[in-house]
Image (spheres, grey):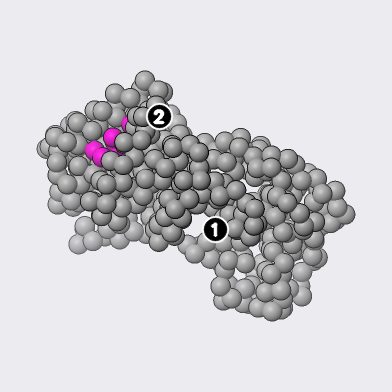
Amino acid sequence: MSSLTPASSPTKPVAPSPNGYTVFAEALPEALARDDFTNLAVLLRYAREGCWAFAVYSHVAAREEVVAALKTLLQPLPTYEWTYSPERPSPLSYLETLSETQRRERAVVFFFDLERAPDELWKSLDYNREALSAQPHGLVFWISSAGRGRAMRAAPHFWSQRSGVFDFRLTPGPLPPFSDWARSSDIVIDDWGNILRQIRITQGLLDELLATPDAPPAVIALQHLRLGRLCYYVDRLPAARTHLEEAAALASTVADPRFSADVLQALGDLALREAELGEARRRYEAALAIYPQIGARLGEANVQKALGDLALREAELGEARRRYEAALAIYPQIGARLGEANVYASLARLALREGDDELAQAQLARALAFYQSLNDRYSIAAQVANFGIELLRLQRRDDAAPLLLQAAGLFEEIGLPQYAVQLRQRAGAALR
């Protein structure tokens, strides 16, 4: 695993709703006005033992609106979410995120994206249906119409034990107007659950757009960029490349030149992650040719910092310092505290290369204090890991191992187990 890259710019989504992301600008009352909504709410509220239901949907916006409404209606009953991912494929893994007390208490759990899972997972639901029914939780499995047929075929016993099927499919018609969130590529990198939530909503919206003949290409391009960046942060690098290249192919449909620069920077980050240093430089320099022309100072600073990281990888220490100082001249002026913290973390690694351990520790402490004030747990874990990886590059294995193990524990806390596993492996190899 190469160095981890913390988010380098503000990553708050545009205009989120209080209970989830609003994909369309207008509400979708049709799904909420149905008897199925009332009946599902009653089942989940009053079922005293474990139960499960299937909720069929046709539009991701309706699904998210129904979930948000149910969460509000069912209060104070706890509600949780589980989204299928290759990293945690078993639906039973939702129990791993709950405390012993939460496992014993009544709650509602929403399951998403099972239609993206292989048949083996569906079959596992047949085998584990008793384990699921033994929990005091109301389980709601969200599936498409195609997913419904697949569930019946692949998991017939699990399907037959359902408490009901609730229909939230919308009347066919044009997509409603898009919200600001759908017209943005911003992301939030914090905990595993929220990352998966963004992936499932963005992937669902992209699927709908691609199935709609008159869908705006610019909005499709934005979803590809968002998915590419999200996949990059969860180590799905082939998927990240696919989406970023699709975004690049559609860049001409987006009126804002910032989009092209953002795609170039994201492709540069991916190339740097995969040690394609020449490709990374080409992408970064192309992005840097755009950002200053349009007054995008944050983008300019981000690329300067990225070019510093590239120079550090190439052992060009003077060039690395020059780039970091260029970025640090911009971040405080525009109030980009996250970017400022990232530079201090990079300066810490530079100080290690220069043999100044005292300065390295001071710069890392300064960066971590920034992240702590921002409640940015991902960046804390990433930069502790990066500092350990830098020590490994310097053959300082005994110094590196404790930091790698510390970072692994932090990644486990925020639900990114794939990073934790890789870091523990590197720590073990360093100690041998």
Q: Is 331 placed above or below 233 here? A: above
Identify the element where label 2 is drawn: helix
Mark 1 vs 2, N-terminal side: 1
Q: What separation in Å lies between label 1 and label 2 (alpha carbons)? A: 47 Å
Identify the element where label 1 is drawn: helix
Q: Can the viewer see residue 15 in this picture?
A: yes
Q: Residue at x 19, y 42 (%)?
A: 312
**Secondary structure mostly taken by the magenta-highlighted segment of the chain:** helix
The quadrant of the picture occupied by the N terminus is bottom left
Label 2 is placed on what type of residue? Ile
Q: Is residue 44 left or right of residue 331?
A: right
Q: Is 345 placed above or below 213 here? A: above
Q: Residue at x 37, y 45 (%)?
A: 264
The percent position of residue 75, horizontal first and vertical second, equals 75, 43
Q: Residue at x 36, y 20 (%)?
A: 333
Stretch in magenta = 301-308
The image shows a total of numbered marks equal to 2
Q: Is residue 126 magenta?
A: no
The percent position of residue 134, horizontal first and vertical second, equals 69, 66
Q: Is 375 placed above or below 73 here? A: above
Foreground pick, 148 / 290: 290
Label 1 is placed on what type of residue? Glu
Residue located beneath label 1 in the image: 96
Q: Nearer the viewer, mark 1 or mark 2?
A: 2
Q: Is residue 136 left or right of residue 91?
A: right
Label 1 neighbourhood size at 10 Å, few (<14), some (14-19), many (20+)?
few
Q: Is residue 214 left or right of residue 159?
A: left
Q: Residue at x 65, y 78 (%)?
A: 154
Residue furthest out toward the left: 355
The percent position of residue 62, horizontal first and vertical second, equals 72, 51
Q: Residue 294 has which mark?
A: 2
